[in-house]
């Protein structure tokens, strides 16, 4: 596995086909690399996310259609500039993005390769001007020196890599904020014993965020959807819907399907001021 950067060393003169399957930043480059690799090189391209030649997000140009449809038109124009006769097809795959392009033959003879290369470069340069990206002249090593490949190791921003003690602190603080908005509910056990339990209030996420210490929130700034993601990662404690959060009412074993739920300790049993609403033999989670 290696990073592919659009440059002279990333050509494939021995290849018959280049396949770009959800190739993201490399999507517009696949026809270019195929055109410059050899006169016999063809390509199959299945675009997904919309990117420009420099690796930036593609900006829709036709407001009368969706971003995806507009990008498909753009990709087709790239294929044509690269001198390919291109067929468009829709794959039978479980995806909404299934339009593919097959550049199966060249429209020009091999003796026009230099002219085609010049046309391709002019098109790439024009896209750079359009997006106000400084275009450094093409060297023997590259076609587009502003292209920035994605990092080999992508940063995880779903709150799962944060310090465990920080996560526990925020969960505890949020539960306290919600429980201060006291709301009592009751449940009757199988044995007929009735128990009253504070289920807490329901607050908008921005209200909860305002009540949390800033030093805690700053650790969530680089996470996708920050506080909301963290709370959704704890579905056995919180219920997050339509921008609001409330405590999750403990579930009975009989209400759940599957056996995996019993392996996790009951958060309410050890952390809620009233303990768990349900007896240990009825709760969906373990009372340790």
Image (cartoon, rainbow, N blue to C red):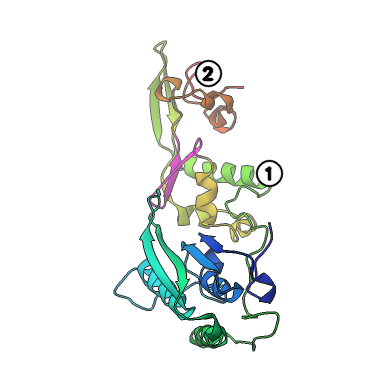
Please tell me how crowded label 2 is: few (under 14), some (14-19), or many (20+) other residues with Cα within 10 Å: some
187 displayed left or right of 153: left
Residue at mark 2:
280
16 displayed left or right of 76: right
Decide if residue 276 is in sight here: yes
Q: Position of residue 273 (x, y in %)?
A: 55, 31
Q: Does the magenta stretch include residue 53?
A: no
Q: Helix or strand or loop: what does disc 2 sit on?
A: loop
Identify whether 155 is placed above or below 81: above
Question: Magenta span covers which residues?
Answer: 235-248
Return the residue nearer the eye: 265 or 6.
6
Identify whether 108 is placed above or below 205: below
Identify whether 204 is placed above or below 255: below
Return the residue nearer the eye: 162 or 273.
162
Between the residue at mark 2 and the residue at mark 1, the CA separation in whole angstroms equals 26 Å
Residue at mark 1:
165
195 displayed left or right of 155: left
* Residue beneath the point at 70% across and 73% down: 9
């Amino acid at each position: 596995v290696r990073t592919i950067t659009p440059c002279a060393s990333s050509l494939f003169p021995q290849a018959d086909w280049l396949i770009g399957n959800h190739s993201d930043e490399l999507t517009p480059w696949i026809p270019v690399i195929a055109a410059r690799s050899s006169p016999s090189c063809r390509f199959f391209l299945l675009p997904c996310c919309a990117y420009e030649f420099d690796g930036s997000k593609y900006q829709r140009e036709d407001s009368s259609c969706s971003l995806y449809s507009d990008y498909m038109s753009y990709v087709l124009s790239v294929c044509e500039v690269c001198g390919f006769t291109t067929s468009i097809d829709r794959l039978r795959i479980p995806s909404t993005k299934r339009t593919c392009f097959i550049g199966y033959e060249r429209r020009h003879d091999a003796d026009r390769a230099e002219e085609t290369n010049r046309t391709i470069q002019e098109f790439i340069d024009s896209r750079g001007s359009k997006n106000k990206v400084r275009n450094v002249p093409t060297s023997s090593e590259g076609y587009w020196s502003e292209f920035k490949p994605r990092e080999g190791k992508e940063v995880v921003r779903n709150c799962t890599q944060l310090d465990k003690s920080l996560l526990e602190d925020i969960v505890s603080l949020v539960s306290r904020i919600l429980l201060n908005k006291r709301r009592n509910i009751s449940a009757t056990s199988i044995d007929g014993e009735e128990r009253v339990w504070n289920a807490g209030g329901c607050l908008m996420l921005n209200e909860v965020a305002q009540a949390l210490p800033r030093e805690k929130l700053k650790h969530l700034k680089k996470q996708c959807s920050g506080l909301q993601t963290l709370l959704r990662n704890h579905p056995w404690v919180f219920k997050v819907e339509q921008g609001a959060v409330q405590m999750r009412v403990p579930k009975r074993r009989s209400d759940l399907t599957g056996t995996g739920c019993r392996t996790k300790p009951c958060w309410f049993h050890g952390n809620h001021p009233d303990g768990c609403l349900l007896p240990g033999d009825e709760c969906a989670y373990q009372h340790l």
